[in-house]
Each structure stands twice: as C-alpha cells, then as structure tokens.
Amino acid sequence: MKIHVLFFAQHRRVTGVSQTDVEAADGSSVQVVAAQIAGQFNLEFKGSMVAVNDTYATPEQVLLDGDTLAFIPPVSGGAVSSDDVFLVTENPLNLTELHAHLLEPQWGGQAMFTGSTRSPNKGETIIHLEYEAYAAFCYAEMKRIAAEAHAQFELGRVVMAHRIGTVLAGEVSIFIGAASQHRKACLDAVPWMLNEAKKRLPVWKLEITESGERWVEGSTGAVTLT
C-alpha cells in the first residue's frame, strides 16, 4: 500500500523534503512504517507525535492505503461555535481586527493574550524567528481546543491566530481571545486555551541569532513514538 508522508521542522531539514510517498506492507501499523521511514531517511522519531489524516494517532494504529502520515516533533467534548475565528498566516496579525471579532452587545467581557518575539533571549540577540507549521492540522486542532473551551466555560466566541514564516523581534506571533457574557468565563478560558495551544498546535520555532540558529525546545501533547 502507498502512504503519503509529511515531514516538518527538524525532520524536514534532515530529509530535505517536506513530503514523500512510501510503499508499506498491507496492515502495517504507524510504528512499523515509522521504523521503515527512519531507516530509509536516517531519522530519529523518538519523542515525536504522529497524525493520520490530520488527527493525532497512536503508534499502534493500523494504516490504510492512501493514508497521510505526519511526523510531528515536540511543539513549541462540546461543539465549536460557527462564529469562532481561526487564522494561520504569514502576514502580520491585525490586532484591531482580531479584537473586533470579540465585540458584540451580548458579550460584556473580552479577554485576550498576545505573544511576541522576545530579544534578547538566553543572553543572545534574536534577529528573527522562523515559524513552521502543519497548517491544516493547526486549524483542526484550534477547532478542537475551541470546542473543549466552549464545553468548559460559558463563552460566546473564541479567536485564535498564529503567525508562520519570518517574525521579527517585537512582532506578535500568537493571539488568543475569548468573549463571554460575564468576565470570569473569558478570563479563565484564555490561559487554558493558551496552554493547550502551546502543547498541541504543530508549530515549531527556529531562532536566528547573531551566532547561528537553534530550534526552540518543544513539548508534546499526545502519545509519542518510542
């Protein structure tokens, strides 16, 4: 069977490609195909998460012909509202427009978090960050995070936006916002969504410094390969 494979961040740099097709035996699990690909491309997948067709998967999941298998290095319940706003873009985030999505007469509270590129970091001047993302999966995971937030908190709307590509020092890279009838719900929801986004969104940061470049250490929010 043929499996479509996606590589990101460190994996993409090692292989030199962002995607490829591999032939695998029928009935192979993710773990088996991962071992095959690791040998073929001289890769180390230990600690990496995997997704099959834009959904996190376990190493034991059996693959089918035509599946898309993505290897995801550690990354730096309810119904989602149809009014929620999600954005992954190479363009600068327009904070005025993003904030405006949270302003409706029925919502008395709005809470927001913005994160920007910090320089210096760890004693080194940061020239810029290079953000790489599995964009389709980012949108899917943003929707899942928003759905869980709606289930836990009484929210009117969720807004999530993330920059990719080159982000200069001082520029905003992430926006997390929530609107609610009363302030407590949105104030509680925003830090929860931010923590989930940091764990679960397949986004990687490469710091470009005066002395070179380095990947920012990430985290994992799903089962990883061993």
Image (cartoon, rainbow, N blue to C red):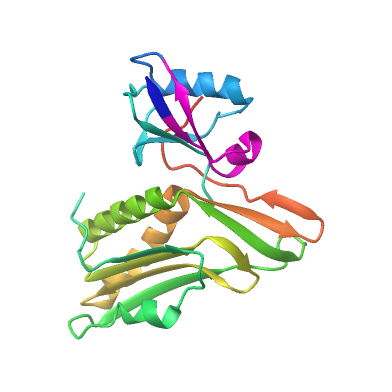
Query: In the displayed image of the protein, which residue is found farthest to the right?
Result: 211
| On screen, residue 50 above or below 184 | above
Q: In this view of the protein, which residue sits in the foreground, 123 or 71?
A: 71
Q: Nearer the viewer, residue 170 or 38?
A: 38
At x 46% / y 21%, what residue is drawn?
33
Residue 194, given in percent of the width and then of the height, sits at: 42, 60
Above or below: residue 163 compared with residue 148: below
Place of residue 180 in the rendered image (x, y in percent of width and height, measured from the top left)? 24, 74
Q: Vertical placement of 102 versus 62: above or below?
A: below
The N terminus lies in quadrant: top left
Residue 122 inside the magenta-drawn segment: no
Q: Is residue 27 visible?
A: yes
Which residue lies at the image location 29% right of the left edge and 58% below the top edge? Answer: 146
Q: Is residue 59 shown to the viewer in this render?
A: no
Picture quarter containing residue 26? top left
Q: Does the magenta stretch include residue 11?
A: yes
Please determine whether, in this image, residue 194 is positioned above or below residue 106. Answer: above
Q: Where is residue 103 in the image (x, y as percent from the top left)?
A: 28, 82
> Which quadrant would residue 188 be assigned to in this image?
bottom left
Residue at image location 40% in from the left, 13% down from the top: 25
- Total residue callouts: 0
Q: Position of residue 207 (x, y in %)?
A: 68, 56
Give the quarter of the image for residue 186.
bottom left
Q: Give the range drawn in magenta.
A: 4-24
Residue at (50, 70) in percent of width and height: 91
